Image: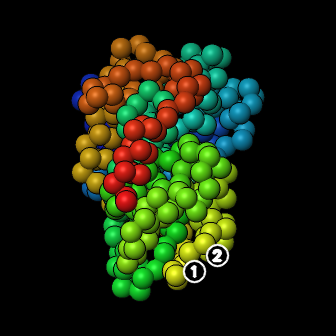
Amino acid sequence: MNAAIRGVVRTAIFNGLKVTGIRQGYYGMIYQDFIELEASGVSDIIQRGGTILKTARCEEFRTPEGRQKAYDNMKLAGIDGVVVIGGDGSFTGARLFNEEHDIPFVGVPGTIDNDIYGTDYTIGYDTALNTVVEAVDKIRDTASAHNRMFFIEVMGAEAGFIALYSGLATGAEAIIIPEMDVNQYSLKNLIESGNSRKKSSNIIIVAEGGKSGGAFAIAEKVKNDFKDYDIRVSILGHLQRGGSPSAIDRVNASRLGHAAVEALLDDQKSVMVGLSNGEITLVSFRRAVKLHKDVDRNLIELARILSV
Ligand code: F6P
């Protein structure tokens, strides 16, 4: 997100605009947590994870009164347009705001889950994916040295992008994601499809939450079917959300930040900038929030074929 903030600030200044940073998202709009951002204020941040502006959940912005306060504060501060980095929740708030008030909002997709409709890519996904791959490779060393079966839980409670892509990238024996109905197969069969020849290790990547109940629940369900294996569970958790961003994340976030300012200059509002087939696109908040981005079903099949 810092690379996107830098992209926004530098593009705006290049175009002769003044930039105000709103700290803590919508909360900062309602409680006037504004800071002026100069070009130098975003130096030395492109390589840092997180966001210099911080983030917060804000129940008050869900109410018309909260949005009115935010509007009044922004009018007072002379804010004429807003770039909001976020996902479904942020864009829903932004859309409501734009139905009620005349300060245009443009969105930049930011979530490690990569589950926003209308864009192939969301900020943080590539870094998170690479972090997961590095961790799984390391766990694989223990798994093969000890002949173990590992259930590794990754983020993505409602979307299996991280699980599916990391599973493919690490040669996981099985991948369990919310998009698959695990009842279709028995869990045992699913895991065995990657286990038909005796392997010295087994890695099963599980997307958190969902109907499967997560890695611990699955390991518990199948432990009697795989008595030859010493079973272990590893939850990767929030380490997936931090760290220095990958080169791809830095470049894409810079492009999206730049594109968001360009969109505001073009009088756009209530739209998200996205990346589709390498090109910048504009998608309405309405579509970005309402429509569902599915994982590529061919990749589920590919993972199954390659894991035998
Ligand atoms: O950004 C979405 C996400 O990464 C989910 O995959 C995960 O369930 C959630 O955030 C974790 O959020 P929190 O930090 O609030 O526990």
Q: Which mark is residue 227?
A: 1
Category of crowding for the residue at label 2, using alpha-carbon neighbours closer than 10 angstroms: few (below 14), some (14–19), many (at least 20):
few
Q: Quadrant of residue 25?
A: top right
Give me the residue at 24% from left, 51% from top: 247
Query: Mark 1 is on which residue type?
Result: Lys
Q: Is residue 151 above or below residue 157?
A: below
Q: Position of residue 151 (x, y in %)?
A: 52, 69
- Farthest top residue in view: 267
Give me the residue at 37% from left, 58% from top: 307
Q: Quadrant of residue 198?
A: bottom left
Q: Quadrant of residue 130?
A: bottom left
Query: Mark 2 is on which residue type?
Result: Asn
Query: Ligand 1 within 8 A of label 2's CB?
Result: no
Most foreground residue, 59 or 163 = 163
**Number of callouts:** 2
Instruction: Name the residue carrying label 2.
Output: 224
Left or right of 140, for residue 23: right
Q: Position of residue 256 (x, y in %)?
A: 34, 33
Q: Which mark is residue 67?
A: none
